[in-house]
Amino acid sequence: MLQRIRGTQDFTDLTLFNFLSAVARAHLTHYGFNEVMTPILEPTDLFRRSLGLNTDVVTKEMFTVKAGENEEAICLRPEATASIMRAFFNNGIQERPWRVFSLGPIFRHERPQKGRYRQFHQLSIEMIGAGTIMQDAEFIAMLDTFISENLRLDSYALLLNFLGTAEDRENYKRALYAFLEKQDNLPRAIQERKETNLLRIFDLKDEECKKALEHAPVLTDSLCAESRAEWDNLRSLLDQLSISYVHDPRLVRGLDYYNKTVFEFSSLDLGAQNAFCGGGRYDHLSIALGEKEPVPSMGAAFGVERLLMLLEARKDKLALPQKPPLIVLIPLAPEQQLLALIAAQELRAVGICCEALLEGASVKSMMRRANKLGAQYTILMGEDEQKGNYITLKDMVSGTEEKVKQGDMVEQVKARVS
Ligand code: AMP
């Protein structure tokens, strides 16, 4: 048999995935976010412009799709924020803020490992046209409530940083560059990024790089007075909303379009790939995409697979949907199969969940199968039942059997399972 493509997954049981989607939809609707869906295929340029030409996603991780001759290059989307911003403009949306979310597959050609796939899912939540720090605080509080109250996760941390304005970052980059210039024996990876994508040196997680950057200057020390006031305000608002966070001065996030507030939610329960949600403010994304005006915005993306890993370990605490009681119909001989099929349809018509065993197996193996399916009752239909116009209703828990007139079957079963 052919094997699935490396870094992709088969979901053979969607219980937890559907639970997560349902809880997310309910929570976000409660906060006034509407669900949207954008295409999986997008112009490659959308991400070259938004994420930046020197980001890992654009240089190494894009799945480019063969387009027709003379057609623009297209790819499988490596994230959803740029798509949602494109949709905002393409559809002439006037509403501001435009509060939307989207759940769907995302594609990145990364080295697969635990918690890291080439096709995975993100729940992206965006607030397009929202420019205040107060809105950042509201947004982060909304995410925190989702994680702690709706998903009931407890061992996680909110890491927070403030990237300031483009000018703040230029000042900071100068200070950082000067610091690096003075260091001897810088690891190769830092030396490379120093010239191409300086801030990304903080995404290098190996011990040697971390050590080399231990005494590097921090971004929040390079903020201008206005940015500093916003950063102080953000922290004070989060304190007043009783949201715990840790200031992580090294958090720069992997994508180019962020400014001001950036954050990540992470959990030690996840191992090396410990971030399960990342986001921040992207005030200049619209400009990068070719618009004249900045549209200040805030967004976040949850890695659905990583949330599922966390939920899997706490399954017992979750209000997962219970399976409805099941009735299994057992025709004792092929002559009663049609009868069983019709009876099953009648029961389903009144909302009863049932399954007729029509494989022509032996009675013993059908009883075993009914047990395996977790049937609450079985309905036995043999020659005697057919001739006498009745069915035998067997309670699978107590093992008791009773005869029920065929005409009363629906009512009798309904009375027992509802
Ligand atoms: P990003 O768009 O890179 O900010 O990622 C947002 C979230 O998506 C991360 O915090 C992860 O939880 C998740 N994520 C990113 N890349 C992957 C991947 N390759 N496989 C699984 N989840 C991922």
Image (tube, helix red, strand yellow):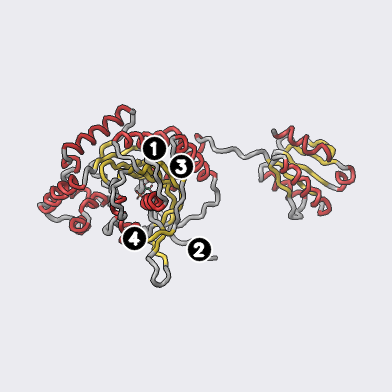
Residue at 43% across / 46% down in the picture? Answer: 123
Which residue is nearer to you in this view: 242 or 26?
26
**Residue 325 falls in which quadrant of the image?**
top right
Foreground: disc 4 or disc 2: 4
Q: Which residue is mark 4?
A: 45
Q: Residue at the location (33% across, 40% down)?
A: 130
Q: Are marks 2 and 3 in contact (CB under 8 Å)?
A: no
Mark toward the viewer: 1 or 4: 4
Specify the amino acid type for callout 4: Asp
Residue type pointed to by label 3 = Asn
Q: Nearer the viewer, mark 2 or mark 3?
A: 3
Q: CA distance from mark 3 to mark 1?
A: 15 Å
Label 2 CA crowd tier, 10 Å (few <14, some 14–19, many 20+): few
Check if mark 4's residue and mark 3's residue have beta carbons within 8 Å: no
Q: Which quadrant of the view contains residue 63? A: bottom left
Instruction: Find disc 2 in the rendering and name its residue.
Output: 3
Q: Which mark is nearer the camera, 1 or 2?
A: 1
- Front of the two marks 3 and 1: 3
Gap between marks 2 and 3 measured at Cα: 37 Å
In this figure, which residue is indicated by the disc labeled 3? 34
